[in-house]
Amino acid sequence: MPSPPKMPRREIPYWLLAIGLLGVLFLWLISANGDYATIFAAVRQGVFVTLWVTFIAFALAMALGLLIALARTSRHRILREIATFYVEIVRGIPMLVLLFYMAFVGAPQLVAFWNWVLATPIEQGWLPGLGVRDFGMTARAIAALTIGYSAFLAEIFRAGIEAVPKGQTEAAASLGLSRMKTFRLVVLPQATRTVLPPIGNDFVSMIKDSALVSALGVQDLTQLGKVYSSSTFLFFETYNVVAFLYLVMTISLSLLVRALERRMARSDAR
């Protein structure tokens, strides 16, 4: 009688075990070493700022990226050309340069445009006039991250939309569904499965890129670490803590993305 087939052995993630051991060692250092405990208390508020900036910017980038992707796949050539121009320009600018541009060029020009277009209502007191200081550096950083990542997310969404077989959209049209209903009921559910893994990877990347907002003085994790190390000269200990906290955030989210991928793969196999 033939023996039943053996189930494939699940590989042990030794890399994850090694990272876990490093985490345990680091937590022990924080509890046993007064310097590490003090540094952790000084920079932990920056974790919340980092996550808050990332979540807000990524949500806005997803919304803007989806609109750009729809324009990229539009039947109207003008919309396609404008969206393509936006994507190519934004993707060609380094994120740090984009942050500086939005902070010191974009925000002042936006304020000047607002005050010029609405000069009469502002003079009559119907609308408030704006000043450059009305836009804090945190808001400018969020705007820059939103614009920068919307171009990359637009390409991810476009690839997901175009991956849906054309025959399905044609079948939906033959059933009398409008373009909006076809997109909502046929295209979007299938495209979501395709784009979810790369979107998760982009979210992890944004957490790392959010460290660049410290160049604008935003009190994120990197900025608090920089300020603390400059005042105490504990550079080694401080940046160990900062690096560890970034690893906790990025690895946790990477594992969450992998879990979602496995769950989607199991549901597709059924």
Image (cartoon, rainbow, N blue to C red):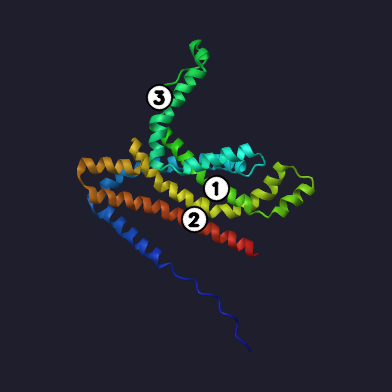
Q: Is residue 200 visible?
A: yes
In the image, residue 4 sits, relative to residue 56, either above or below, namely below
- Local crowd size for mark 2, using a 10 Å CA cut-off: few (<14), some (14–19), many (≥20): few
- Residue under the image location 71 percent in, 43 percent down: 179
Contact check, label 1 and label 2, Cβ < 8 Å: no
Disc number placed over residue 256 in the picture, else none: 2
Where in the figure is residue 238, as x and y percent of width and height?
26, 48
- Residue under the image location 43 percent in, 30 percent down: 106
Q: Is residue 218 left or right of residue 76?
A: left
- Residue lying at the far right of the rendered structure: 175
Q: CA distance from mark 3 to mark 1?
A: 33 Å
Disc number placed over residue 155 in the picture, else none: 1
Q: Earlier in the sequence, mark 3 or mark 2?
A: 3
- Residue lying at the far top of the rendered structure: 124
Secondary element type, mark 1:
helix
- Residue under the image location 60 percent in, 82 percent down: 4
Q: Nearer the viewer, mark 1 or mark 2?
A: 1
Where in the figure is residue 2, as x and y percent of width and height?
62, 87
Q: Earlier in the sequence, mark 1 or mark 2?
A: 1
Where in the figure is residue 155, as x and y percent of width and height?
55, 47
Q: Nearer the viewer, mark 3 or mark 1?
A: 1
Split into 4 quadrants, where in the image is the C terminus?
bottom right
Disc number placed over residue 25 in the picture, else none: none
- Local crowd size for mark 1, using a 10 Å CA cut-off: few (<14), some (14–19), many (≥20): some
Identity, as a three-letter code, of the amino acid under mark 1: Glu
Identity, as a three-letter code, of the amino acid under mark 3: Val
- Residue under the image location 69 percent in, 50 percent down: 186
The one nearer the camera, 102 or 229, is: 102
Where in the figure is residue 122, as x and y percent of width and height?
49, 14
Q: Is residue 109 left or right of residue 160?
A: left
Q: Is residue 82 left or right of residue 39?
A: right
Residue carrying label 3: 132
